[in-house]
Image (tube, grey):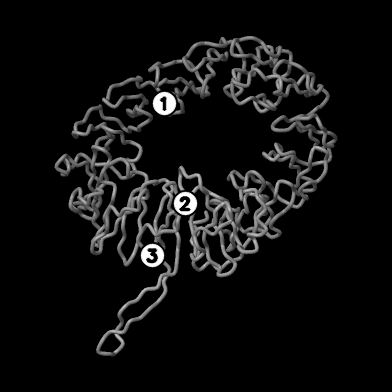
Amino acid sequence: MTDSADINNLQEKYMIIGTFQKSHDEAETRRARVLKRENNQWGFIDQAGKEVIPAKYLSVGVFNIFGYAKVRENISLTRKVNCGQPNPCIEKENLPFYYFIDKNGVQRSNYFENINDWDDNEDYFIGEINKRNEIVRKKDMHVICQSKGNTRLSIDASRYKLSDYFIKESRNDGKKDLVDIKGHHLTNFLYEDVIAYNNFCFGLVKKDNVYTWYLLNKDLKPYGEDFYTETEMLDYNFSKDVITLQQKEGFFLINDKGKIISEKYKSIRKTGDLFLAFNGKFTGLIDKKGKIVVPFEYNQADYYKDGFIILRTNRKDKTLYSFYNIKTKKLVNKSLYIPYKKYIVVEHNKNFGILNQNLKPLIPEMYKQIQPLGDTGYFLAVNHQDKMGLLNRKNKVAIPFIYDIPYHMLTYNFIAPKNESEINTISKYWLCFKKDDTFGILNYKGDIIIPFEHNIMTCFSVIAVSENGKLGLITKSKKRIPAEYDYHVMADGEKNGFYFVKKEGKLGAVDENNQVVIPFEFENVDEVMDDFYAEKFFVFRKRFGYSLVQKDGKMFYPYDFEYEPPKMKEGITIFDNKILYDIYKNQINIYEAEQEYLDKTDYE
């Protein structure tokens, strides 16, 4: 049996059948979660439809990359109670506990009353039982640390890889300490709290009801009262062997020996491998040794992306943009616009051109406007006669400068290739141009695809034209949808032949033959990005709530959701007090179940 097989026979036995998933990261075998009709409990089947893990659980999670699934089951416990007899009485009760099983259903972890897990921590989880907790390693379910007495353990999921001491133990008196996986304490609870980053440690000291973070030396003692910082500053000013600290007089770079290695600044902010520093008047860049690499001549600086730092200089009438390339260590003192990955718009004396990422000029600074079309190597440009054309990266004219400037030049590209690898098939992509107050469509070779005969045209994922106050559409296949609508809503469904339009204030969808495929009864449509929904469904907003509609126009759920449906985890989610489930990605169904024992983290 496969994900696409006929499962009518299984539906007689199971109320819910999730999608099949690998039982661990490298497994060939797959398992699907099922809810059995006979006892209303969960188990797993294989691709042959065999129940390989008995349906005896209150809830089951998906298998993680190590081959373990979290389950919840009623466990029978016995305990001694005082019943007025010479000997204590034995009392039995069933209580729900979590634990982990392997692909064969064998228990591989202790029982827990609760499990705290994080998607961004692939190594550990915390299990809680009898008012104590344990740090458990996910790959083998080994308990690496247990709380003692009245202490509690936690892991800072965003920082735990920055130090061997990533487990935090908290006492009832409020003091905290860090512990490594061998159980060794870092400071033996000397401080109110402790933070460790590689070679740096900070202790929180309470004095006169004032809490202050201090940098600690190798003996875990404060360097002195001049060395202090606030908690929030530690996140973005930290580097492997240098950190920014705020003193009473300003900010400094400090190395891991506690030595000041920079001048004093009003502020220092880490960006890439450098630091943006403000001296009270201007901004510059310093390296991790405190050396100035970009002079303090700029009003503002920000890290952009791909190794660029944008530097701004304010003038009375405009802002000048320069940039520093971290990789090449080159500073370009020209007025620049935000760079693309491969191409950078440069301006000199109100003339625009293009540089590549190595600062080599590709198109000279001679145009009134210019805009890269992504990273394709093609550029829309306007000359000083206010005519628009298309250039390629070799500075050759692809479309002559004979066209007028539309209202917003850069929004009028219709279908742009994603990258230069598609240049060989560039003729299949279209651009929207204006000429003599009419609009038309050209391809990248200058061939006219749609004649210049429309007075108003917008070109995004589909061409919209206005006629007599109404809106019509022209599709990629040149099919014309009559101008009888009020508004066009862009959505990814147009890839599937759905065109979202509004009529008399309500939104629906038509196909390229103007046949209604989704009725006009909605307020708006949202794209569904999750894999389980994206292939087949749109989320429509109504006045009160949401509806999930299949991309063939069939509404699977006739009522309103109070909230936007959440993503599915392996074909199952809990939503609006019901379980939504996707049978092998073919259809979504609904199961109304008791929520008492269900764990939403298993399904969301």
Q: Is residue 563 above or below residue 39?
A: above
Q: Given contact means CB atoms under 8 Å apart, are the residues at marks 3 and 2 in contact?
A: no
Q: Given contact means CB atoms under 8 Å apart, are the residues at marks 2 and 1 in contact?
A: no
Label 1 sits on a secondary structure element that is loop
User: Disc 3 marks which residue?
Assistant: 113
Q: Is residue 565 above or below residue 474?
A: below
Residue kind at label 3, given as amino acid type:
Glu
Nearer the observer, 254 or 306? 306
Q: Position of residue 321 (x, y in %)?
A: 48, 21
Residue kind at label 1, given as amino acid type:
Asn
Q: Given this view, does label 3 or label 2 mark the residue nearer the observer?
A: 2
Nearer the observer, 562 or 51? 51
Tell me the tag on residue 213. Answer: none
Q: Given this view, does label 2 or label 1 mark the residue nearer the observer?
A: 2
- Left or right: residue 541 compared with residue 343: right
Label 2 sits on a secondary structure element that is strand
Q: Which quadrant holds residue 544? A: bottom right
Q: Determine the residue positioned at 79% across, 34% down.
A: 473
Q: Determine the residue positioned at 58% across, 69% down.
A: 38
Residue kind at label 2, given as amino acid type:
Phe
Disc nearer the start of the sequence (3/2): 2
Tell me the tag on residue 63. Answer: 2
Q: Position of residue 584 (x, y in %)?
A: 62, 51
Nearer the observer, 161 or 38? 38
Nearer the observer, 253 or 166? 166
Label 3 sits on a secondary structure element that is loop
User: Disc 1 marks which residue?
Assistant: 299
Q: Position of residue 325 (x, y in %)?
A: 42, 20
Q: CA distance from mark 1 to mark 3?
A: 56 Å
